[in-house]
Every structure is written in structure tokens, then in C-alpha cells.
Amino acid sequence: GNEETLRHPAGGKIDVRAELLKLHKGVYSANLMTLAVIGNVTLDKLEEDVREMFGTIVNREVEETRDWARRSPFGAAWRKA
């Protein structure tokens, strides 16, 4: 969107901030995320950095709703429970 449509969607009948927060609360969860990291430091340092940067992401135990994301060519066991 542009500035006008984001400030006044549907003629001002939609609270964009509230809708974004609702979306964030509904789908932004650690259990739905995957992270790949590469670096020229030790594995211990990489782990420390990742925990510092991403460790505060809450696991809301949100159920995956995208069918394609639930399927894996590696079988069901590839994801941690």
C-alpha cells in the first residue's frame, strides 16, 4: 500500500496497528521458525550470538495452518516436537 491506504484503509474503518498486532500474536511464534546460521567463529560463539539475538522470541505453540509448510519431503520426524 501507499501512505494513504495504510493510514486510512477502508476509509478509516480499520485500525492497521491493531490488525498487525493481532497477526503478530497469531502467527509470530518460535515453533514456526527455522534459522540457518553460518559464520567464521566457533560453534559456541554462533550459538551464543543466536541465543542473544533470537532467544526472546516467544513460543506461542501456534499450530501451522499453511498446508505446504506441514508437509516435508523428509517425513514428519524432521521437525522437532
Image: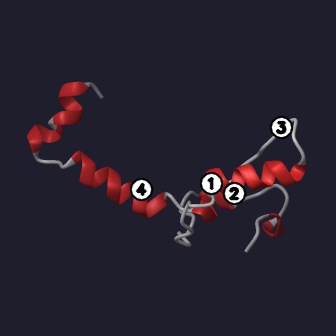
Nearest to the observer: residue 59 or residue 78: 59
Q: Quadrant of residue 56?
A: bottom right
Please state which amino acid type lies under the numbered disc 3. Answer: Gly
For the residues marked 3 and 4, what is the alpha-carbon distance in whole angstroms? 29 Å
Instruction: Decide: is 41 above or below 79.
Output: above
Nearest to the observer: residue 63 or residue 40: 40
Q: In which quarter of the image is residue 18?
A: bottom left
Q: Which of marks 3 and 4 is nearer the N terminus?
A: 4
Taking the spot 34% from the left edge, 59% from the top edge, the residue there is 22
Residue for badge 3? 39
Residue for badge 1? 54
Residue for badge 4? 24
Q: Is mark 4 on a helix, strand or loop?
A: helix
Horizontal side of residue 62 vs 72, given as left or right: left
- Percent from the top left, x then y, of residue 23? 38, 56
Q: Which of marks 1 and 3 is nearer the N terminus?
A: 3
Residue for badge 2? 51
Please state which amino acid type lies under the numbered disc 1. Answer: Phe
Q: Quadrant of residue 3?
A: top left
For the residues marked 1 and 3, what is the alpha-carbon distance in whole angstroms? 16 Å
- Percent from the top left, x then y, of residue 58? 54, 66
Indicate the quadrant containing the C terminus: top left, top right, bottom left or bottom right: bottom right
